[in-house]
Amino acid sequence: MKEETGHEAETFEELLRRYVAPGYSNELTHIYAAKDLRKSCSEMEYDEDISVELYEPGEVVDMIERNVIEDSKTINGILAVRYLSAP
């Protein structure tokens, strides 16, 4: 997380486990919510070009509804944070 976003978390909460494609794979992914974030320095690889953008939770759900976000892992993670994360 530090490498990709330049943030660190005090704790992580496991929200759900999901199979990528149970019809042909047993790959299981885990979705976590990062809690108590603090800004850190990014540790990107020299050839990476990543920009971090901040959105309100409602904006992200709207992006899912408008098919701006189409990746199923991302959608699962966002909805899990929205509906399963402890306050």
Image (cartoon, helix red, strand yellow):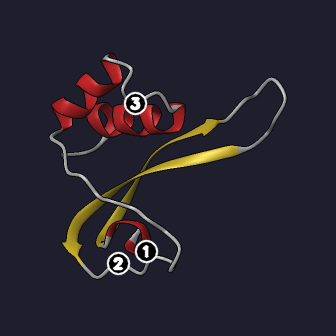
* x and y percentages locating residue 26 in the rendered image: 79, 39
The one of 77 and 42 positioned closer to us in this rendering: 42
The answer to whether residue 22 is above or below residue 9 is: above
The quarter of the rendered structure image containing the N terminus is: bottom left
Q: Quadrant of residue 27?
A: top right
Which SS class for mark 1? Answer: helix
Give how far apart the Cα atoms at labels 1 and 3 are: 22 Å
Check disc 3 and report its element: helix, strand or loop. loop
> Which residue occupies the foreground of this view, 27 or 68?
68
Query: Which residue is depicted at the point 43% across and 65% down?
Result: 49
Give the distance between the C-alpha atoms of the residues marked 2 and 1, in whole angstroms. 5 Å
Quick one: SS at disc 2?
A: loop
The residue to which callout 2 is attached is: 42
Q: Which mark is residue 3?
A: 1
Question: What residue sits 22% from the left and 67% below the top?
Answer: 37
Mark 2–mark 1 CB contact (< 8 Å): yes
- Give the residue type that dot 2 points to: Ser
Pointer 3 or 2: first along the chain: 2
Residue positioned 47% across, 27% down in the render: 70
